Amino acid sequence: MLKFYNTLIRKKQIFKPLKNKRAGLYTCGPTVYWFAHIGNLRTYIFEDILKRVLEYNGYKIKHTMNITDVGHLTSDADTGEDKLEKGAKREKKTVWEIAEFYTTAFKKDLKQLNIKPPNVWVKATATIKEQIDLIKILEKKGFTYKIQDGIYFDTSKLKTYGRLRGNKKITLKAGTRVAMVCGKKNPTDFALWKFSPKETKRQMEWNSPWGIGFPGWHTECVVMGIKNLGIPFDIHCGAIDHISIHHPNEIAQAEAAFGKILANFWLHGEFLVLKDGRMGKSEGNIITLENLIKRGFNPLAFRYLCLGVHYRSKLTFSIEALKGAQNSLNNLYQKITKLGEVCPPLICGRSVLPQIDYRKKFLNFIQDDLNMPKALALMWQMIKDKKISPQEKYKLLKDFDRVFSLDLRKIKSEKIPQEIKKLAEQREKFRRQKNWQKSDEIRAKIKKMGYQIEDTKKGPKALKK
Ligand code: AMP
Ligand code: ZN
């Protein structure tokens, strides 16, 4: 049974989809003003693992991800500059060029990490009308108020506000750590629509019933999630930083407008950190996937590193740790190449040896809130297990890779030469005729040539020694 830790109830819960064997998934996407850092990418790897585990369990997934190309301010308190406008100034490009460039870079990162793209990508700028429509509903229902700098959501009007945080009161305090927008009624209130500043013309701005401006960051995900997946949908993901502000704000809008929870399951990945603390642009310690590739690492070594730490635990990144992951991955590739040399050219059909134990154990681990570290350890245990045949190991590795996605399935087995295949066929003919002497002679000849014949219940197989 599939179980996930649901932040909404703060415990593991059996996954019950809304529709049989189907899962609607929404993952908060990148703000495309700069390259994604490996912290961001850890979150997308966790979400990819979630998808693959669901698929491994027979689910069909409908996945939507947004591209935030407008409205995400440099502070979570609705102050500061729009990150995209800031990026455009920095690079002397248009906002649209910035968004395009970093979206392409992001998609390239995903590809290199074997992260499956969503079924639907949606840009925030492609849903301005829908966002305005949602704000209109909220306004009609009395959840909004207008101040000098925009239209805000009044969190005090919604009794359930902040329940994603386990009923803990949100501790944002006006005027302390974060700057407070002048006129905001409650520290937790958030911008739905921000007015363009009077003195400067923004590159991205739209007309609205309240004036020219742009949407706040928290509305796009609600609109896109509902548009593509309905309300409620099954699973919503992000990293832990979204537990306190972004996701409660999404939930609040959906509950206020439609009286429903936005999603049934809320899964949050822990952060990737550095030994001396958080990775962040302001800390000036960002590492991108390209940085790692330039240092000679296989991007999948980073994926391997992420698999080794449970998604709800902090991952402390270091180059030493990545080197360790790269070595393990190389080792794994070597092992599977050797196992792949086992060739079953003489028989058709499936391997005959039972594989229930490892496959079942693997399933149990991945079903238990995506326990990849245990699944990875099991894989190594299986590789070392002398009781199972090379063919079986090869098959299991390829099967596990449907979830790990470390390119194990792409590794080609070394082809058994035609000559060996012919000899093995001759031997099989003699064996059927019960001509043991001839068949043994051929077996010896094959052995001399560096191969061996293994007789299985389904027939003989030629293997490299
Ligand atoms: P952003 O592009 O800033 O909107 O972030 C994209 C995703 O990465 C969001 O789900 C964030 O919560 C997540 N994220 C940001 N920093 C980290 C980090 N250090 N480790 C893991 N995930 C992160
Ligand atoms: Zn979101």
Image: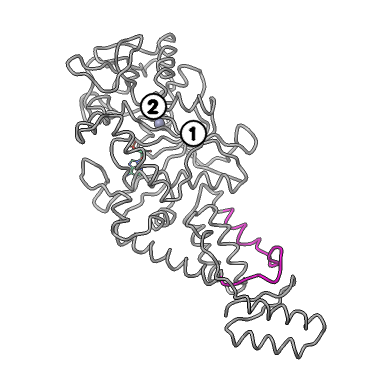
Q: Residue at x 23, y 29 (%)?
A: 178
Q: Amino acid at mark 2?
A: Ala
**From what the image shows, is residue 446 above or below residue 126?**
below
- Most frequent secondary structure within the magenta stretch: loop
- Residue nearer the viewer, 125 or 141: 125
Please, what secondary structure does the residue beneath circle 2 have?
helix
Measuring from the top left, give residue 348's x and y in whole percent.
Answer: 71, 65
Q: Amino acid at mark 1?
A: Val
Colouring rule applied to residues: one colour
Indicate if the residue with disc 2 has its beta carbon within 8 Å of ligand 2.
no
Q: Residue at x 41, y 34 (%)?
A: 28
Q: Is residue 354 magenta?
A: yes
Q: Specify the farthest residue to the right.
A: 433
Q: CA distance from mark 1 to mark 2?
A: 13 Å
Task: Give the label on residue 124, or none.
Answer: 2
Span colored in magenta: 341-364
**From what the image shows, is residue 174 above or below residue 284?**
above
> Label 1: few (<14), some or many (≥20) within 10 Å?
some
Please state the quadrant of the image where ligand 2 appears: top left
Left or right: 436, with 210 as reference point = right
